[in-house]
Amino acid sequence: MNRVSLIGNVTRELELCKSKDGEIPYTRFTLAVNEYVISTKEKKTTFVDVVAFGKKAEILSRNVHKGQKLAVEGKISTGSYFNNDGIKVYTTSIIMEDFTFIDSKKDII
């Protein structure tokens, strides 16, 4: 099973993009997820890359702003590419399947 649920704060304003063929809208953003580490009694923040597609991407890009708290459910996706120096870079992101506005004052449809 490949399933992940996260709650965190959006780190920047979202931008709606289109796939190379112009057919599929998507947005890519980072979620700052806080956790409390019992052994050190400190807060730790993990920055997680998230990608949303289709109608969900359109809704998010119109209604989510930097700092807003969001619950995200999805699956982990890994990949790789070669950077300008020819070095292979590995990536990990969450492909969002569902979301919930945590501290929104309005209902979004």
Image (spheres, helix red, strand yellow):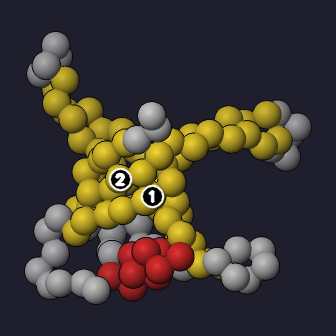
SS category of the residue bearing label 2? strand
Residue drawn at 53 percent across, 76 percent down: 54
List the single residue furthest toward the top: 39
Quarter of the image where the C terminus is located: bottom left
- Decide which of 52, 8 is in the foreground and name it: 52
> Relative to 93, is 39 on the left or the right?
left
| Residue 35 visible, this angle | yes
Residue at left offset 19%, top offset 23%: 37
Q: Which residue is mark 1?
A: 96
Compared to residue 52, the image places residue 73 above or below, namely above
> Which quadrant of the structure image shows residue 33?
top left
> Quick check: 90 above or below 60?
above
Q: Is residue 25 left or right of residue 62?
A: right
93 or 89: nearer the eye?
A: 93
Q: How many marks?
A: 2
* Mark 2 touches mark 1? (CB < 8 Å): yes
Residue 88 x/y as whole percent: 79, 34
Residue 36 locus on image (x, y percent): 16, 30
Callout 1: SS = strand
Residues 51 and 66: in front is 51
> Which kind of residue does numbered mark 1 sit on?
Met
Residue type highlighted by circle 2: Glu
Q: Which mark is residue 28?
A: none
Q: Write down the residue under mark 2.
A: 73
Seen in the picture, residue 86 relative to 5 is either above or below; the reply is above
**Can residue 15 be spotted in the picture?**
no
Picture quadrant where residue 20 is located: bottom right
The residue lying at 73 percent from left, 40 percent from top is 80
Q: Is residue 56 left or right of residue 88?
A: left
Give the spatial CA distance, label 2 vs label 1: 6 Å
Residue at image x 46%, y 38%? Answer: 2
Where 83 sits versus 55, above or below? above
